[in-house]
Image (spheres, rainbow, N blue to C red):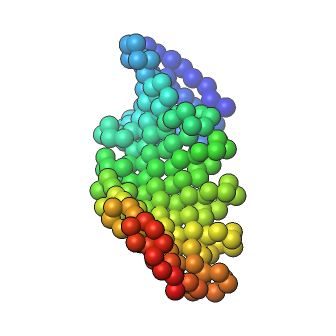
Amino acid sequence: NATQSRSDLFSVVNISGIAGDRVLVFSCVDGLDSCRHSLFDVAADTQVDVQVALRDNQSMRLAPDGRVQSEQRDTGEAEGFDLEVVYRDGEKIREEKDTRGDGKPDVITRFEAGVEVLQEQDTTGDGAFDTRIQFEGGKPARQDRDTTADGDFDQVTFFAPDGSLVRQEVDTNADRQADFKRFYENGETGREE
């Protein structure tokens, strides 16, 4: 439950159940872009704690200094917001993508210095991340897959800097040891051990 009292510039919202906190909300409409921008004083200390901006198919959470902390986007691949991007100190550190439209991320990508370093994927929709891709210089270097849904990676693929396959290691008996290795030359299977 919330009650509001309005003036020309802001609303003061009393939220029951949150120790009587008063939240100062400032909202505006920016011209033709129809941007709704809200500032929240959650601590009731007359300082802006959180800013939220809504525009078309995007929602952004801003720090008090105006830097983006996170944003949600509707990329059109699934219903509603299907991509969340998280920032630290103005730099992208994580993307969470819902490719199935079930409201849960099934692809999570981590970034360092704006470059992909790790991606986890739930390729089966069971809620478990069964594929992990490690990147070097923004390009896939290693891919680990759990092809048996037992929670252990049983297939490891290594890539050259140009993206071509180098080697694949497969654990066929669930002992966490490679039972055979397949080596590639120019993208073609060379030899197996």
Residue at 32% in and 37% down: 66
- Residue 19: give x, y in percent of width and height: 59, 44
Of 57 and 144, the residue lying toward us = 144
Res 118 quadrant in image = bottom left
Residue 49 locus on image (x, y percent): 41, 41
Count of residue discs: 0
**For this rendering, which residue is in front, 15 or 75?**
75
Q: Residue at x 57, y 78 (%)?
A: 170
Taking the image as shown, residue 105 lies to the left or right of residue 50, namely right
The image quadrant of residue 38 is top left
Looking at the rendering, which quadrant does residue 44 occupy? Answer: top left
The answer to whether residue 61 of the structure is visible from this angle is yes
Residue shown at 38% from the left, 61% from the top: 163
Residue at point 59% right, 53% down? 106
Q: Is residue 9 visible?
A: no
Quadrant in which the N terminus appears: top right
Q: 97 left or right of 116? A: right
Instruction: Tell which of 94 and 142 is nearer to you.
Output: 142
Q: Position of residue 18 (x, y in %)?
A: 60, 43
Using the image, determine if residue 154 lies above or below residue 43: below
Residue 192 in percent (x, y) is at 51, 82
Is 131 located above or below residue 100 in the figure? below
